[in-house]
Image (spheres, grey):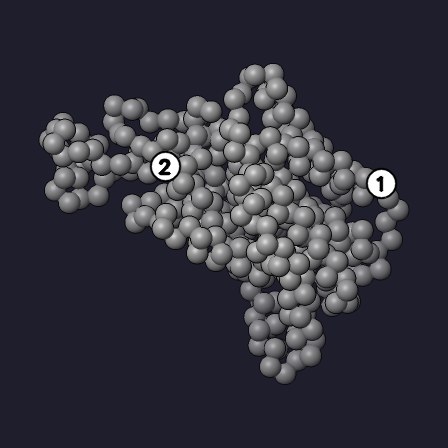
Amino acid sequence: MAPLFASQPALAKRRPGGMTPHLPNPAAGSAQELPRYNAAFLGKAPILDSILLLKALILGIIEGLTEFLPISSTGHLIIVGDLLGYTDESSKVFKIVIQLGAILAVCWDYRRRLGTMLVGLVDTPAERRFASLLVIGFLPAAVLGLMFHSTIKALLFNPLTVATALVVGGVIILYVEKRAYHPRILSVDEMRWTDALKVGFAQALAMIPGTSRSGATIMGGLVFGLSRKTAAEFSFFLAIPTMFAATAYDLYKNWALLRMDDLPVFATGFVAAFFAAMWAVKGFIRFISNHTFVVFAWYRIALGLVVLATSYGGVVNWSAA
């Protein structure tokens, strides 16, 4: 679809939907005729289009705000990226970078707990047990991800799949919230390895874009007997090995797409995601202390229906993939 924000074509030539400006042919004119590039032909870097930075800022904030809420950060990035016209090859690396910013925010928020665990791995049984729970919970997504990662990305990473998953996930959340709720596990320290494994299989469902990794793990945790706070905290901790592994794998697969001239744009998105995620995690923990997840369910359903309605009504020509 046509991008929501676009730079003036007379000023720059860009890959379709891309965020990285390309330098024109030096033979096409002098540096004086192209002031935007600030004498790029003399070896200086081009002046970045402010629209590119605005796109990066918007997507970074969206990633940070949605990564740890049960509303699917990947789904939001696919939908908003399509609206912004940012769907080219460079967008793959950009989304990896801002995801890393979000997970580092959680590492910073829980730095004391993580530090205690790392130090205690040597001689503290409780910390070794906690680390083993994270490894066990991580394994299902790791194994299934290696098996089906490429296929899922090729077939399901599009706005209409995301919209459908948002609606289905919202209905599931409403169903879970209507069930009788009798938590038997009130802290992460009370979890058994079987509890971690079951939550890990729930997390694997989030390979389908629009499902939400945090939504799958938290709702799965509630079904398996975890308290709301325990389910949310284990979801945050489980995100650390899962997202670091996914980030490393995606960077390996897309290494050839890294470009030095994309660095300022990527840095903008990274920083925005980091600070937005820090704020979102703290606010989310406070919210679930006194509220259910029903509001997130209705938000998912509403957003999914809007995307589907605008597509089938011909209002928005969403990308097929």
Residue 159 location in percent, x, y? 57, 32
Residue 161 location in percent, x, y? 61, 34
- The residue that mark 1 highlights is 178
Residue 237 location in percent, x, y? 63, 60
- The residue that mark 2 highlights is 19
Point 29% across, 24% down: residue: 9
Point 61% across, 19% down: residue: 312
Residue 16, image quadrant: top left
- Residue 229 appears anywhere in the view: no
The answer for how far apart the CA atoms under marks 1 and 2 are is: 44 Å
Category of crowding for the residue at label 1, using alpha-carbon neighbours closer than 10 angstroms: few (below 14), some (14–19), many (at least 20): few
- Would you say 177 lies left or right of 134 here? right
Residue 204 location in percent, x, y? 66, 52
- Would you say 182 lies left or right of 193 here? right
Amino acid type assigned to the residue bearing label 2 in the image: Met
- Residue 18 appears anywhere in the view: yes
Point 30% across, 24% down: residue: 8
